[in-house]
Image (cartoon, grey):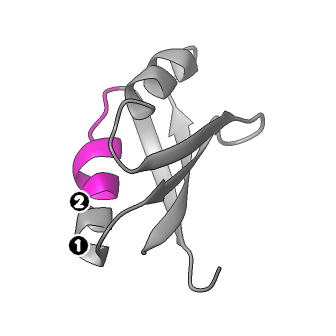
Amino acid sequence: MPSAFIIINCDLGSEEAVLKEIVQLDGVKEVKRVSGIYELVVEVESDSAEALKELIKGKIRSIPRVRSTVSLLVTKS
C-alpha cells in the first residue's frame, strides 16, 4: 500500500484550521503539529500510487492557507 509523509508550511496562525481539514480526508493516518520551518507532518496512505498522488496534490495542497508542502514517499516499511 503506497504511503508518504507530507511536511506542510501554513500561513501564520492557521495551523489548527489546516489540521482540522486534513484529519477529515480519507487516507490520512496521522497528523502532528511541529515547530520550526514547517508546522504539520502528515502520514498518508492509499490503495494505489495514483490515489496517493490525488490525495497529496488534489486535496492537501489545495487546502486554503497551505503555503507549501514536501512529499516524502515511503519506499520500504
- Give the magenta-colored segment's residue range: 54-64
Secondary structure of the residue carrying tag 2 is helix
Report which residue position mark 2 lands on: 54
Main SS of residues in magenta: helix
Q: Is residue 67 above or below residue 18?
A: below
27 is higher (above) or lower (below) than 64: below
Identity of the residue drawn at 45% across and 25% down: 18
**Rendered view: 46 above or below 11:** below
Side of 47 where 15 appears, left or right: right
Closer-to-camera residue (74/57): 74
The front one of 16 and 13 is: 16
Q: Is residue 27 above or below residue 2?
A: above
For the C terminus, give its image quadrant.
Answer: bottom right
What is the three-letter code of the residue carrying label 1? Answer: Glu
Which residue sits at x=48%, y=51%?
69
Quadrant housing the N terminus: bottom left
Q: Quadrant of residue 38?
A: top right
Task: Report which quarter residue 22 is drawn in.
Answer: top left
Q: Which mark is residue 50?
A: 1
Asked if the magenta segment contains residue 60, the reply would be yes
> Is label 2 in contact with label 1 (beta carbons under 8 Å)?
yes
Q: Give the amino acid at mark 2.
A: Glu
* Residue 34 x/y as whole percent: 74, 36
